[in-house]
C-alpha cells in the first residue's frame, strides 16, 4: 500500500489524461490512462518505463470510472487544442480496463476528428469481448518482444498463465474482426537478437502495416511515479538502471535482415 503522504508527494498528478507526449512517429499525443491508481499490467517487462509493476495481473475490470476519464479529457483538450492523436496507454495494460470502449466512444464524441490509438501487449486479445471493445480505434499497436516462450518469459515476465501462444492467437483473431490499422512494436536487446529468424516468421504471419523496432534507451526506474507515463523530462530522486541496448550497427543489421526476409515496412528507432 502507498501511504497517503507519499502519495501526495509523488502522485500529485491527479489526471487520467497526460501529455502531450512527443512521439517521433505520431506527433503530439494526449495519453489516456484507463488504469491510473497503481501500475497494473499482465506483463512486468524488464525494461518497463514504469519500473517494477505493482499489480501483475490479467484481471479485466473497471479500474477508473469512465466519467473521470471523459472529464479529464475535456479539461486537457481545452489546454491542448493542437494535438495530433490520442493514445491509450498509461499506468499499465489499457485493455485490462473493462470500460475502455465507453472511453473510446466518449472521446470520439468530444473530438471526432482526432484519431485514437492504443499501445497494448496483446495478452487479452484472445478474449472476444476485449477485441470487440477496441473496434472503434483507428490504430492498434501490439507489442511483440519475443519469438519463443522461453524468451517471452524472460523479457515480458508475464502474469501466471499468460503465454506467447495466447498473444499470437489473440492478434490473429483481431485481424479477422478489426478493420483499422495494426502495427507491431518490438523492444530489442542482446537477449532476443538470437532468435530473429523465428521473429521474422512471427511478424510475417501477423503481417502488420508497420513494424517498429525499439531498444531500451530509457533507464529502468527503481520506483513508480505517475509522471513516468509521459515524456520522462523530469528527474526524480530515485535510482535508475541503464539497460543493454542494441548498437546502431546491430539495429541496422536487424532492420536490413527483416526488410529482406519479410517485405514488411520496418522502422527503426535509430533512423
Ligand atoms: S507491457 Fe508495457 S506497461 Fe506492461 S510491463 Fe511491459 S512495458 Fe510496462
Image (tube, grey):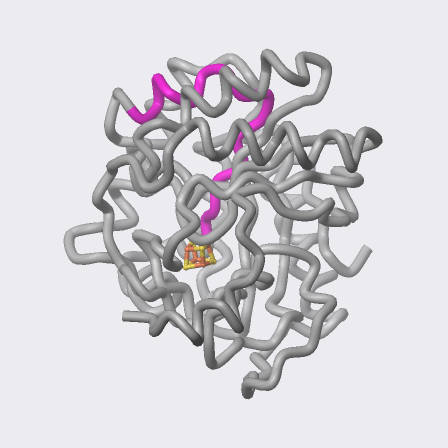
Could you tell me which residue is drawn at 50 percent across and 57 percent down? Answer: 196
* Vertical position of residue 198 compared to residue 62: above or below: below
Report ligand 1 position as a quadrant. bottom left
Instruction: Tell me residue 153's x, y (percent).
Output: 29, 64
Between 45 and 256, the residue placed more toward the observer is: 45
Q: How many marks?
A: 0
Instruction: Tell me residue 55's x, y (percent).
Output: 28, 60
Between 194 and 156, the residue placed more toward the observer is: 156
* Vertical position of residue 78 compared to residue 161: above or below: above
> Left of 246 or right of it: where is 128?
left
Q: Magenta part of the protein: which range?
A: 130-144
> Left of 237 or right of it: where is 28?
right
Does residue 198 appear anywhere in the picture? no
Instruction: Tell me residue 59's x, y (percent).
Output: 21, 44
Could you tell me which residue is drawn at 50 percent across and 22 percent down? Answer: 104
Between 150 and 177, the residue placed more toward the observer is: 177
Could you tell me which residue is drawn at 81 percent across and 29 percent down? Answer: 81
Could you tell me which residue is drawn at 55 percent across and 46 percent down? Answer: 15
Rendered image quadrant of residue 132:
top left
* Vertical position of residue 78 compared to residue 189: above or below: above
On whether residue 19 falls in the magenta region, the answer is no
Between 142 and 31, the residue placed more toward the observer is: 31
Query: Looking at the rendering, in which quadrant would you find the C terminus?
Result: bottom right
Instruction: Tell me residue 146's x, y (percent).
Output: 41, 56
> Left of 31 or right of it: where is 128?
left
Does residue 133 appear anywhere in the picture? yes
Query: Looking at the rendering, in which quadrant would you find the N terminus?
Result: bottom left
On whether residue 143 falls in the magenta region, the answer is yes
Rendered image quadrant of residue 52:
bottom left
Quick one: which residue is furthest to the left in this view? 161
Amino acid at each position: 500500500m502507498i501511504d497517503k503522504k507519499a502519495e501526495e508527494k509523488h502522485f500529485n498528478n491527479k489526471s487520467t489524461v497526460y501529455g502531450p507526449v512527443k512521439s517521433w512517429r505520431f506527433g503530439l499525443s494526449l495519453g489516456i490512462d484507463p488504469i491510473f491508481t497503481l501500475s497494473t499490467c499482465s506483463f512486468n517487462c524488464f525494461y518497463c518505463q514504469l519500473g517494477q509493476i505493482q499489480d501483475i495481473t490479467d484481471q479485466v475490470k473497471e479500474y477508473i470510472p469512465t466519467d473521470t476519464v471523459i472529464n479529464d479529457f475535456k479539461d486537457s483538450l481545452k489546454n491542448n487544442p493542437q494535438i495530433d492523436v490520442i493514445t491509450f496507454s498509461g499506468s499499465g495494460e489499457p485493455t485490462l480496463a473493462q470500460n475502455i470502449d465507453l472511453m473510446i466512444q466518449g472521446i470520439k464524441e468530444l473530438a471526432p476528428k482526432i484519431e485514437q490509438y492504443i499501445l497494448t501487449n496483446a495478452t487479452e486479445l484472445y478474449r472476444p469481448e476485449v477485441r470487440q471493445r477496441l473496434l472503434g480505434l483507428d490504430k492498434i499497436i501490439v507489442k511483440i518482444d519475443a519469438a519463443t516462450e522461453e524468451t517471452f518469459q524472460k523479457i515480458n515476465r508475464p502474469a501466471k498463465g499468460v503465454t506467447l501462444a495466447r498473444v499470437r492467437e489473440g492478434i490473429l483473431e483481431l485481424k479477422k474482426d478489426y478493420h483499422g490499422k495494426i502495427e507491431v512494436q518490438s523492444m530489442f536487446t542482446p537477449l532476443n537478437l538470437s532468435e530473429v529468424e523465428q521473429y521474422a516468421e512471427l511478424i510475417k504471419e501477423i503481417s502488420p502495416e508497420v513494424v517498429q523496432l525499439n531498444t531500451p534507451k530509457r533507464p529502468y526506474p527503481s520506483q513508480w511515479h505517475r509522471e513516468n507515463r509521459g515524456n520522462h523530462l523530469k528527474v526524480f530522486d530515485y535510482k535508475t538502471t541503464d539497460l543493454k541496448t542494441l548498437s546502431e550497427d546491430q539495429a541496422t543489421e536487424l532492420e536490413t535482415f527483416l526488410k529482406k526476409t519479410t517485405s514488411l515496412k520496418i522502422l527503426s528507432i535509430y533512423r
